[in-house]
Image (spheres, rainbow, N blue to C red):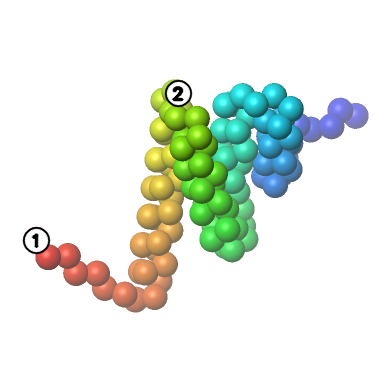
């Protein structure tokens, strides 16, 4: 019996660990992007609501640090960063809606 690749069994924590280990061995952008994307996927698809509160801020900090150190080389890095930021905004506004907070914007 062949083992399933970790991306097929949706073990996001394991994906993150494997990606970081690969990045340590071979410091290439795709491995680091994979590590960050696994945090985003955990926040997006994990049934534990606390994973959103932990995974998204960590993903944002990792992405910001990576951009600060290495700059932006490709479109996928920008898209990944935007996905993370948009998910955080969406989560924040859903939390406000859940708490019955009404936002008033003046123009």
Residue 43 seen in this snapshot: no
Q: Which residue is mark 1?
A: 107
Give the quadrant of residue 18. Answer: top right
Position of residue 101 relative to residue 62, above or below, is below
Query: Residue 62: x percent and y percent?
Result: 54, 44
Query: Residue 50: x percent and y percent?
Result: 59, 63
Query: Residue 9: x percent and y percent?
Result: 72, 40
**Quick one: which residue is furthest to the left in this view?**
107
Q: Which residue is mark 2?
A: 73
Query: In terms of sequence position, does the residue under pointer 1 or pointer 2 come before the other?
Result: 2
Circle 2: element type: loop
User: Which residue sits at x=45%, y=30%?
Assistant: 71
Q: Quick one: 40 or 71, which is closer to the camera?
A: 71
User: Which residue sits at x=47%, y=35%?
Assistant: 67
Foreground disc of the pair 1, 2: 2
Horizontal side of 66 relative to 88 (left or right) equals right
């Amino acid at each position: 019996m062949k083992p399933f690749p970790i991306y097929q069994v949706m073990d996001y924590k394991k994906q993150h660990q494997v990606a970081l280990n690969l990045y340590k061995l071979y410091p290439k952008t795709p491995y680091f992007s994979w590590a960050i994307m696994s945090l985003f996927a955990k926040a997006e698809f994990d049934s534990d609501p606390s994973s959103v509160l932990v995974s998204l801020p960590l993903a944002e900090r990792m992405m910001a640090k990576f951009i600060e150190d290495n700059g932006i080389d490709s479109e996928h890095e920008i898209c990944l960063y935007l996905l993370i930021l948009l998910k955080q905004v969406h989560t924040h506004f859903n939390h406000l809606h859940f708490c019955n907070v009404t936002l008033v914007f003046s123009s």
